[in-house]
Amino acid sequence: MNKTSENLTDGSILKHLFRLAVPITFGYMLQNAFNTVDMIFVGRLGPAAISAVGVSGDLLRLVGIFSLGISTGAGIMVAQYLGARNFAQAGHVAMQAIILAFMFAIGIGIIGYPLAEFGIRILRIDEPDVIQLGTTYMHIILVGISTMFLSMTLGSIFRAGGDAVTPMFVLVFSTFINIVLDPLLIFGLWGFPKLGVAGSAYATLIGRGIGVLILLYLCWRDRAPISFRHVQYRPDLVEMLDIFRLGIYSSMQGFWRHVSRLGFLWVIGPYGKFAVAAYTLCMRLRILAMNPGFGVANAVAPVVGQNLGARNIERAEKTTRIGNLLGTSLMTAIGIIFLLFPQMFLKVFTDDVEVIQIGKVFLQCLSLTFGFIAFSLVLGKALNGAGDTLSPMLITLAAQMGVGLGLVILLSNFLGIIGIWIGIALSNVVQGSVMWLWYRTGKWKTINVIKKGR
């Protein structure tokens, strides 16, 4: 185990969770800052630009769900092998995950590039300016989508070894690059070309790409939880299949979540670009509010994984209980703030009165369900850390596609746009409640990830 690794199988659980959750939360805030900073600058270009980047972002997250699966599968296996003190195999798994992530990214870029405009039109977006701007944005991101895949995979590998600080500092630097480049490329300051929406895409790719290069360098210089110096660089299809097998359900969980969001957009689209812009901004604010929940959830996963690798089930259970309390408390507090001051947060992105009025109601509906979102995040990651990636996927499918999208379509016919907001909120309540009920069955304790003899 390298010097940046952390043994999570003994010592104070609360201390481990805080040590991991604080930098992970900050890291997620920075990762989302890529999109948030873009949206603040893009918002100055008008509702069409906001809608274009928002719709494109949802489509890109849909095609990027494989990165979630690969990073989750790699994180589970690396954490459990480190917990079992099999460091050589942990490094081998990490390298195969990197190769797999790069291969998938290239394939998705080749397939997705010619389908970009079709993806926007299928959501019933018919404003020519939104379609043109969104297609341009997607084309640029798809060319460099490997930066997203590699960034997520490397971050998961570092966290699996108990090092959440290094990815955080790398994200600080990457975000700084993004923030500097955004106004230069969007508005053409200081002699740079004025690229508009395309400039935000280039800024994001450059910042993220620099971060990936730094993390790879650290792995080859033995300054990461695992080392790439003595691993096998050629593809190991058996190991890749193991990573993919564990991660495929996390990919599908992300897939159904994003399909449901595209379904929401399909229903919202006919209400016009102001409604689409309001939905886009509120979903961005929702993601920002979820950062502490993401931080705690992703801290729980490696602690559960390493302890199950060491066969310490009781400690894994205690970790989940503490993490769930932390995540729920933090996100409920944030929900109360959003409920009381929705317009203040929306005005950060836009000064359009109609967008703010529509978004205010949606944000207040969402804020009431933040505690249930925390349940879903923390318990879902605890199940993932144990190797149960199927159950969270099925729960997400039922809650988001069955309950959420079904209610959105139904209620919009009776209540109009307010029915859409209520349907989305209720899907969060269902998902969090069912995730808790499944975790309570305890079936996750019987899953075996580590292969004997390796």
Image (tube, rainbow, N blue to C red):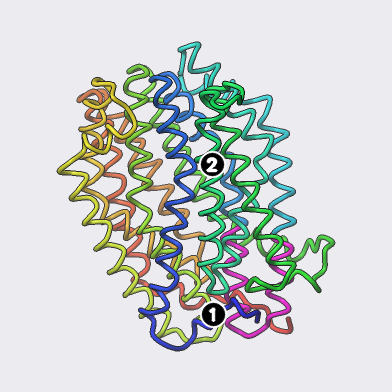
Region of the chain picked out in magenta, as a range: 71-97
Outermost residue to the right: 234
Give the answer, above or below, for where 204 lies relative to 152: above
Which residue is the site of mark 2? Answer: 178
Question: Residue drawn at (46%, 88%), measured in percent from left and top?
Answer: 10
Q: Is residue 76 magenta?
A: yes
Q: Are marks 2 and 1 in contact (CB under 8 Å)?
A: no
Q: Nearer the viewer, mark 2 or mark 1?
A: 2
Outermost residue to the top: 128
Question: Residue drawn at (25%, 25%), measured in percent from left and top?
Answer: 417
Alpha carbon of mark 2 to alpha carbon of mark 1: how far?
31 Å
- Give coordinates of residue 153: x percent, y percent: 62, 57
Question: Residue drawn at (61%, 33%), measured in percent from left and top?
Answer: 202
- Give coordinates of residue 6: x percent, y percent: 54, 80
- Give coordinates of residue 339: x percent, y percent: 18, 44
Question: Residue drawn at (38%, 63%), measured in percent from left and top?
Answer: 378
Outermost residue to the left: 340
Residue type, mark 2 in image: Asn
Magenta-drawn stretch, dominant element (helix, strand or loop): helix
Give the answer, above or below, for where 407 lies relative to 322: above
- Looking at the picture, tell me which residue is in the foreground, 110 or 201: 201
Residue type, mark 1 in image: Glu
**Label 2 neighbour load within 10 Å: few <14, some 14-19, many 20+:** many
Q: Which mark is residue 6?
A: 1
For the N terminus, the image quarter is bottom right
Describe residue 183's horizontal placement relative to residue 150 as left or right. Answer: left
**Label 1 neighbour load within 10 Å: few <14, some 14-19, many 20+:** many
Q: Is residue 238 magenta?
A: no
Mark 2 or mark 1, earlier in chain: 1
Q: Quadrant of residue 201?
A: top right
